[in-house]
Structure formats: structure tokens, C-alpha cells
Image (spheres, rainbow, N blue to C red):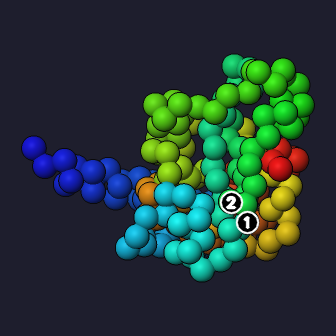
């Protein structure tokens, strides 16, 4: 067996899925495959040459039994209290998805989760903290693929709603 070869093919398929989803939405930008990891917000900001807050952390979360994506700036943290209030559930009912659940819900591994090319649509909340930027950077399916996108396009293409969900 050649695990590296299969991992590379999986990565290529994930990036192609993101590219295809964006093309179907009319987005003309391209995915940048970086030589180094963009697994963390700090690594992604360094690779992109942008502010940490412009990095979109795409988090799969549960509020009660409802799965959703929470898009949080790289310089902020998801607030379970704010998300619970926004979703009308108790604070203890807000949980980050496990790595296995993330893969099942999004088709992407942790560190490369894109809000585009999901196996099935998920509700998306976009932290209001992004409103300070015109352009943001999202993961593109792998831990070394990212893409810049205008904030308005990100919100429109994901059918996202702005909400105060991070501190």
C-alpha cells in the first residue's frame, strides 16, 4: 500500500470538489495550494500574507441536535454562550463536532474544512467580526489549500447569516 499516494489523491479530490462548487456559484478566483501547512489560523495568515482576523475558521458545531457551520475570524474564539443564545438552546447543548463528525458532515478533515463543496447543505452563521474586512481567506479542503474571497461572496454563496458568535 502507498498511503501517501492515496492521501494525495484524496487531497486532490477535495480541492477539486471546492473548485467545482465555487465554479458552479460563478466564483472566478482560484485555490492556492501552499508548500507549507495552513492547518491553523496563524499558519494560514502567514501563508496568505494577511491579517489573522481575515482567516476563516470553519467550525462544525452542534446546537442541540442541529448541525451547522460557524465561521469565526482567526483572531477570535467561538463563544458557546453567544451561539447558544443565537440558536435558542442551553449553553451545555453547544458542542464542537468531533474529528469524525467533521469529516462526516463536511467531507473535509479538521484543518482543511471548507464551507464549499459539502456533501449536504448546512446552515451557516458568519461571525459579525468579519465585517471589518472586505476580503477573507477560507480553507479549500486540505491542510495546505486556501483561497481569498470577498466577504460578500462568502456570505452569499454559503447562504450565511451574520451573527455575533465569537469573542
| Residue that numbered label 2 is attached to | 74
Task: Indicate whether 47 appears above or below 89.
Answer: below
Q: Are marks 2 and 1 in contact (CB under 8 Å)?
A: yes
Closer to the camera in the image, 64 or 156: 64
Q: In the figure, residue 154 lies in which quadrant?
A: bottom right
Q: In the figure, residue 121 lies in which quadrant?
A: top right
Q: Position of residue 40 (x, y in %)?
A: 54, 58
Q: Position of residue 32 (x, y in %)?
A: 47, 73
Closer to the camera in the image, 89 or 122: 89
Mark 2 neighbour class, 10 Å CA radius: few under 14, some 14 to 19, many 20 or more? many
Residue 121 visible, this angle: no
Element marked by disc 1: helix
Element marked by disc 2: loop
Seen in the image, is 116 located left or right of residue 86? left
| Residue that numbered label 1 is attached to | 53
- Give the residue displayed 68% in from the left and 59% down from the top: 74
Q: How many marks?
A: 2
Q: In the figure, residue 122 lies in which quadrant?
A: top right
Label ID, residue 18? none
Mark 1 neighbour class, 10 Å CA radius: few under 14, some 14 to 19, many 20 or more? many
- Give the residue displayed 75% in from the left and 21% down from the top: 93
- Give the residue displayed 88% in from the left and 47% down from the top: 164
Seen in the image, is 28 located left or right of residue 161? left
Seen in the image, is 86 located left or right of residue 30? right
Q: Which tag, 2 or 1, sits closer to the chain's start?
A: 1
Seen in the image, is 54 located left or right of residue 79? left
Residue 17 visible, this angle: yes
- Give the residue displayed 83% in from the left and 44% down from the top: 165
Q: Quadrant of the N terminus?
A: top left
Kindly report the distance in space between the C-alpha atoms of the residues bearing marks 2 and 1.
5 Å
Q: Position of residue 9 (x, y in %)?
A: 27, 54
Closer to the camera in the image, 78 or 147: 78
Amino acid at each position: 500500500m502507498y498511503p501517501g499516494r492515496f492521501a494525495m489523491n484524496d487531497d486532490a479530490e477535495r480541492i477539486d470538489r471546492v473548485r467545482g462548487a465555487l465554479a458552479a456559484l460563478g466564483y472566478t478566483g482560484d485555490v492556492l495550494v501552499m508548500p507549507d501547512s495552513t492547518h491553523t489560523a496563524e499558519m494560514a495568515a502567514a501563508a496568505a500574507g494577511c491579517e489573522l482576523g481575515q482567516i476563516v475558521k470553519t467550525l462544525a458545531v452542534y446546537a442541540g441536535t442541529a448541525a451547522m457551520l460557524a465561521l469565526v475570524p482567526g483572531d477570535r474564539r467561538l463563544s458557546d454562550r453567544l451561539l447558544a443564545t443565537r440558536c435558542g438552546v442551553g449553553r451545555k447543548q453547544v458542542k464542537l463536532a468531533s474529528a469524525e463528525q467533521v469529516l462526516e458532515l463536511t467531507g473535509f478533515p479538521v484543518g482543511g474544512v471548507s464551507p464549499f463543496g459539502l456533501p449536504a447543505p448546512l446552515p451557516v452563521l458568519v461571525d459579525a467580526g468579519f465585517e471589518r474586512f472586505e476580503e477573507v481567506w477560507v480553507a479549500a479542503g486540505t491542510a495546505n489549500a486556501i483561497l481569498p474571497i470577498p466577504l460578500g461572496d462568502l456570505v452569499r454563496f454559503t447562504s450565511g447569516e451574520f451573527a455575533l458568535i465569537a469573542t
